[in-house]
Amino acid sequence: DLLNPHFSLADAASRHVDGKETLTIMGIAAQGKPAVVAITTEMTVTDMFGQVYRPTASGSGFIITENGYIVTNNHVIEGAETITVVLDNDDAYPAVLVGTDPSNDVAVIKIDATGLPTVVLGNSDDLLVGELAVAIGNPLGELSGTVTAGIISALDREITLSSSSGTQKLKLLQTDAAINSGNSGGALFNSFGEVIGINTAKNTGTGVEG
């Protein structure tokens, strides 16, 4: 009943499956946030006057193994000379690049650590339009561990992305959970606290909302 003053997005948009525990947004955050990391990169750039400077960029990622393998977007680490990962507990580690798939904007990096919290991987093929979607990441490069919530707005939305390596077409999930610069590479969770997507792109411009 949407007129109920106690209406809850988590209740209205949650999916229920036998044998799986449906979590509240607070439960999803408690389970997933420790395994979501902030990523900072540095590269060397020479401008047209020959001056050298080292700009930094920020993004997000999520830990998939206890020994430090982390998934992020390729565009977060592309061209980086140094990669630093900051865990949810504020511990910082240098990371090395393991591999990339630019065509799908996915990369894997690794830090030298053990006993790390990990995410639970789900299946995006099981998603339904209208179900709960919770994003956790590092928006603006300075708000790590931020949790935002919305719904799955559409499935298999084909868009064209532009990057330094050219343009590419990707089929993406669409969500109205708030996504900002720095969320790239962070995790999108379903009602069960499982990762079902990577926050990759946002549509911006005059008149664009949600």
Image (cartoon, grey):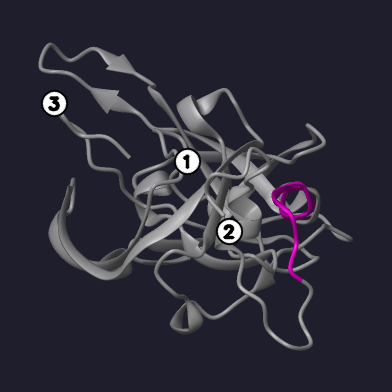
In the rendered image, the residue lying farthest to the bottom is 18
| Residue toward you, 80 or 202 | 202
Q: Residue placed at 66% from the left, 36% from the top?
A: 145
**For numbered disc 3, what is the local secondary structure?**
loop
Instruction: Judge whether 120 appears above or below 83 on screen.
Output: below
Q: Check disc 2 and report the residue beneath it.
A: 12
Q: Mark 3: which amino acid?
A: Thr
Say which label, 1 or 3, has the lower sequence index. Answer: 1
> Would you call the spot at circle 1 few (<14 residues within 10 Å), some (14-19), or many (20 or more)?
many
Say which label, 2 or 1, has the lower sequence index. Answer: 2
Instruction: Judge whether 86 appears above or below 167 on screen.
Output: above
Instruction: Name the image quarter holding residue 138.
Output: top right
Q: Nearer the viewer, mark 1 or mark 3?
A: 3
Q: Position of residue 192 (x, y in %)?
A: 69, 69
Q: Residue placed at 44% from the left, 75% from the top?
A: 128
Say which label, 2 or 3, has the lower sequence index. Answer: 2
Q: Which mark is residue 183?
A: 1
Tell me: 167 left or right of 3: left
Instruction: Name the image quarter holding residue 87.
Output: top right
Q: Which residues are magenta?
A: 22-29
Q: Residue placed at 68% from the left, 67% from the top?
A: 64
Q: Position of residue 81 (x, y in %)?
A: 45, 40
Q: Check disc 3 and report the residue beneath it.
A: 206
In the rendered image, the residue lying farthest to the right is 115
Q: Mark 2: which amino acid?
A: Ala
Q: Which mark is residue 43?
A: none
Tell me: 177 left or right of 35: left
Q: CA distance from mark 2 to mark 3?
A: 30 Å
| Residue toward you, 103 or 186 | 186
